[in-house]
């Protein structure tokens, strides 16, 4: 009897080994969704179930909505996997990873033209959102300390920025109790001006936020001109108001494509810059960077020193734990590509972007909003169509393309646009394929609208 049971178990085990994953019982039952199952399943079955479900997601290669990097070299992938188990905060256990972060910060400070006499500091973050929060906190604290020293009230801080900023700026104002002075956009002018800023700033302004490559249209605020305004204000009124540059999208473009353009630490009032490593830094999500012009721009009170993980470790972050892998991957890109490698990639993206914009304009069906095309994205309006960009975006979804359609912020909220981000792995053939699908989708919608009108007219006749 015992022998029979043993043989039965052997047969069952053998059957399981012979049966493919798709032939197992796990593919005839619904996967657990709301409660953890009582029993587990073989690793291959668990992998395959999740893998198949994730196929319902969009294809990253066809996602022109996101700025986020979707491809890296195999060597980078390998380094990432080797670093996945390291919590970056454990500096005492992983000192070399901490040194690599500091090297990246120093390289960025030099790339952003920090003066040699300055002792630039900074930190890696989960992304630009955390970097912006940390940078603005430092400016709020600096303003508060100065007001206290002068014996002036410090209970009404404000921050000035345009409506072209990322939503994280508004989050900062709400979360950290700072009055938000949001400058509305104007039709046909989708960035702020020095005149706009001059109307809003006062002695309680902790910082002016400017954008190098806006999320909405890919344009940039006139950073040099706003810097000059703040210098004049400092000389005439004594208000030393810093600039924080949000370089999430453009911070890895401008140094390589427009090296002579002054937007960075060459400008006197630029005290901090954030950049997204996982955008045009060419690293997978999520990694961002915050760089201060000088150590004195980061108040010591904001740096926590912890010792319960081993040695005494300074910490300046909103998120205590974070992976080391993307920091290592950023360093890999710097070593692997160098300045010339980044320059080649950025110029290739810009060439493909300009080609796309030219073809869309030549079709006569689209108007390109960001005509100067400083960064690798194209934002368009429809010209005289009987359908909307939202309908066109949805039609392109049917072909797998993910292209966002949206309205611009106040006071340009009546402007409906569609935006396409060109990334490193989006070559000329892919651009041509997209253009062909855009035109086919456009023509399909146009015919559909014509048929609808004909039906309406026929109904009126009867």
Image (cartoon, grey):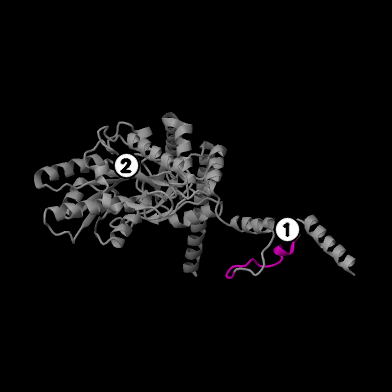
Question: Which residue is depicted at the point 18% across and 61% down?
Answer: 155
- From which residue to which does the magenta span run? 24-35
Residue 442 percent location from the top left of the image: 49, 50
Mark 1 crowdedness (10 Å alpha carbons): few <14, some 14-19, many ≥20 = few
Q: Earlier in the sequence, mark 2 or mark 1?
A: 1
Residue 399 percent location from the top left of the image: 56, 51
Front residue of 271/147: it is 147
Which mark identifies residue 449? none
Give the secondary structure at mark 2: strand
Instruction: Establish if 358 lies above or below 199.
Output: above
* Numbered marks: total: 2
Which mark identifies residue 121? 2
- Residue 328 appears in view: yes
Give the secondary structure at mark 1: helix
| Eye-nearest disc, 2 or 1 | 2
Front residue of 92/379: it is 92
Mark 1 sits on what residue? 22
Residue 303 percent location from the top left of the image: 31, 51
């Amino acid at each position: 009897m015992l022998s029979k049971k043993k043989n039965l178990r052997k047969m069952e085990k053998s059957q399981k080994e012979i049966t493919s994953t798709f032939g197992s019982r796990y593919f005839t039952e619904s996967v657990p969704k709301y409660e953890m199952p009582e029993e587990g399943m073989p690793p291959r079955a668990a992998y395959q179930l999740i893998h198949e479900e994730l196929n319902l997601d969009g294809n990253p290669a066809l996602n022109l909505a996101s700025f986020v990097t979707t491809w890296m070299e195999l060597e980078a992938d390998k380094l990432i996997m080797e670093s996945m188990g390291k919590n970056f905060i454990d500096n005492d256990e992983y000192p070399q990873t901490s040194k690599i972060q500091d090297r990246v910060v120093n390289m960025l400070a030099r790339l952003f033209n920090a003066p040699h006499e300055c002792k630039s500091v900074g930190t890696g973050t989960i992304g630009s959102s955390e970097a912006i929060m940390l940078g603005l906190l430092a400016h709020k604290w600096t303003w508060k300390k100065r007001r206290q020293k002068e014996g002036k009230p410090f209970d009404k801080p404000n921050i000035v920025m345009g409506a072209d900023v990322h939503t994280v700026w508004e989050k900062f104002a709400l979360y950290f109790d700072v009055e938000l002075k949001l400058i509305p956009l104007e039709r046909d002018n989708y960035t702020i001006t020095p005149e706009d800023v001059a109307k809003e700033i006062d002695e309680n302004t902790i910082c002016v936020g400017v954008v190098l490559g806006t999320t909405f249209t890919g344009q940039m605020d006139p950073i040099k001109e706003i810097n000059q305004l703040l210098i004049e204000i400092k000389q005439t009124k004594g208000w030393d108001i810093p600039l924080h540059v949000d370089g999430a999208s453009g911070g890895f473009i401008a140094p390589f494509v427009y090296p002579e353009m002054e937007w960075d630490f060459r400008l006197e009032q630029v005290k901090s810059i954030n950049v997204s490593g996982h955008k045009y830094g060419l690293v997978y999500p999520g990694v961002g960077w915050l760089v201060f012009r000088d150590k004195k721009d980061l108040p010591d009170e904001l740096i926590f020193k912890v010792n319960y993980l081993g040695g005494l470790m300074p910490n300046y972050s909103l998120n205590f734990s974070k992976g080391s892998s993307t920091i290592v991957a950023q360093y890999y890109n710097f070593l692997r590509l160098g300045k010339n490698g980044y320059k080649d990639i950025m110029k290739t993206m810009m060439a493909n972007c300009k080609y796309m914009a030219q073809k869309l304009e030549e079709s006569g069906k689209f108007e390109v909003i960001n005509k100067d095309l400083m960064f690798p994205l194209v934002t368009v309006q429809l010209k005289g169509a009987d359908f909307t960009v939202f309908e066109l975006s949805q039609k392109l979804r049917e072909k797998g393309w993910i292209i966002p359609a949206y309205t611009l912020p106040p006071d340009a909220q009546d402007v409906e646009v569609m935006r396409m981000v060109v990334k490193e792995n989006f070559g000329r053939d892919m651009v041509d394929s997209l253009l062909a699908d855009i035109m086919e989708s456009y023509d399909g919608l146009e015919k559909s609208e014509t048929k609808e009108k004909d039906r309406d007219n026929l109904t009126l006749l009867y």
